[in-house]
Amino acid sequence: MTTKIKAPTSQSRHLPACRCSAQTGHTAQTLSMPAAELARASLAPATIRAYRSALYAWDTFLNDRAESDTLIAEYLTARYEAGTSPATCTQIVGAIRFRAKYQGYIDPIGPAAQRVLAGIRRRGRDRGRGQMDGLRWNEADTMVRIAQCDQTLAGLRDAAIIAVMSDALLRVSECTALNIEDLLQTDLPDGSARITVRHSKTDQEGRSSILYIGPTTATAVRAWLNASQIDDGPLFRRVRRGDHLGNGRLTDRSIRNIVKQRAAAAGVSGRFSGHSLRIGSAQSLATAGASVVEMQIAGRWRDTSMPAHYARAQLAGTGAVARLRYGCGNKK
């Protein structure tokens, strides 16, 4: 049985309307605008964009039919047979489920869809683009040096971005969100500094984290600030053609492009994304002898599974057999 809560019309700008079949016998309730906005704020903007895209494709498949567990199962099967990865199928289910709950309907994901998704995950576990390559500490350092050699605003900015993301294991969204006031203790005796990450994928409530950046990274950040002469607002900004500083904050896409372009300029080969500096730092930590828990804390992951996955080759090289039988490990 389905109960609908009427949300304000402005929500349609974010998620298309749900096509669940309404049942009688329930009194419709009205969700206030503030409540609807708070519900939407439970997801990161990037997740909302991904959900919206998935839902438009799903609604096109529905072709005015009402959502049902069976149709969802058939749609997932069709997508999988067309080459879609298990991760994307899981995201589709998450989008359908979130929209139903957000717009006041009972969860339409039932036993059929759940079993099909479980089968997709099992049978398609090797499908997908695969993990992006990591940019390890030595590679990030090379990228920073070459960017600084440009002697341009864009070069100094890019050097600071790469250095900060490598030291702090930042997600792309965390880097774009940094403001000048998030820089802390920039005059410590050892030359290091601290930054505050106020929100993250694993900190939606904004409890914030204070992270370490090393002396060379702090120097790169100061060089960018001295050249740009900015003292408040976004830390990393657009630089227009002709090396003219803009006021606008860099986008996630801009950060990804900077990482890829600077890796190419440094002669580092591989499949890179904005996530590569985070992956590479986890791999470098593992090579240096960090435990999985230390890696989890440094990268602010919810549990140890992701850092262990990213650095599985490095962890094998520092494991018990490598250390105790062959005297290897702890080599950078």
Image (spheres, rainbow, N blue to C red):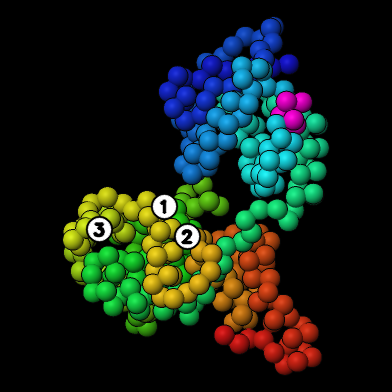
Is 301 drawn above or below residue 33 in the view shown? below
Mark 1 to mark 2: distance in Å?
A: 8 Å
Q: State the residue lying farthest toward the top.
A: 25
Q: Which mark is residue 169?
A: none
Q: Earlier in the sequence, mark 2 or mark 3?
A: 3
User: Image point 66% across, 17% down: which residue?
Assistant: 65
Q: Earlier in the sequence, mark 1 or mark 2?
A: 1
SS at mark 1? helix
Q: Are marks 1 and 2 in contact (CB under 8 Å)?
A: yes
Q: Quadrant of the C terminus?
A: bottom right
User: Image point 45% across, 19% down: which residue?
Assistant: 9
**Residue 223 lies within the magenta run:** no
Q: Magenta part mainly helix, strand or loop?
A: helix
Residue 93: x, y in percent?
A: 67, 36
User: Image point 66% across, 53% down: which residue?
Assistant: 128
Task: Say which residue label 1 marks.
Answer: 252
Q: Which residues are magenta?
A: 70-74
Identify the image quadrant of residue 286. bottom right
SS at mark 3? strand
User: Image point 59% across, 11% down: which residue?
Assistant: 28
Determine whether, in the image, residue 318 is placed left or right of residue 258: right
Q: Amino acid at mark 1?
A: Asp
Task: Say which residue label 2 marks.
Answer: 274
Task: Say which residue label 3 marks.
Answer: 239
Residue 206: x, y in percent?
A: 47, 49
Q: Amino acid at mark 2?
A: Gly
Residue 260 in view (yes/no):
yes
**Residue 71 lies within the magenta run:** yes
Q: Quadrant of the N terminus?
A: top right
Is 306 drawn above or below residue 190 in the view shown? above
Instruction: Looking at the picture, tell me which residue is in the foreground, 66 or 186.
Output: 66
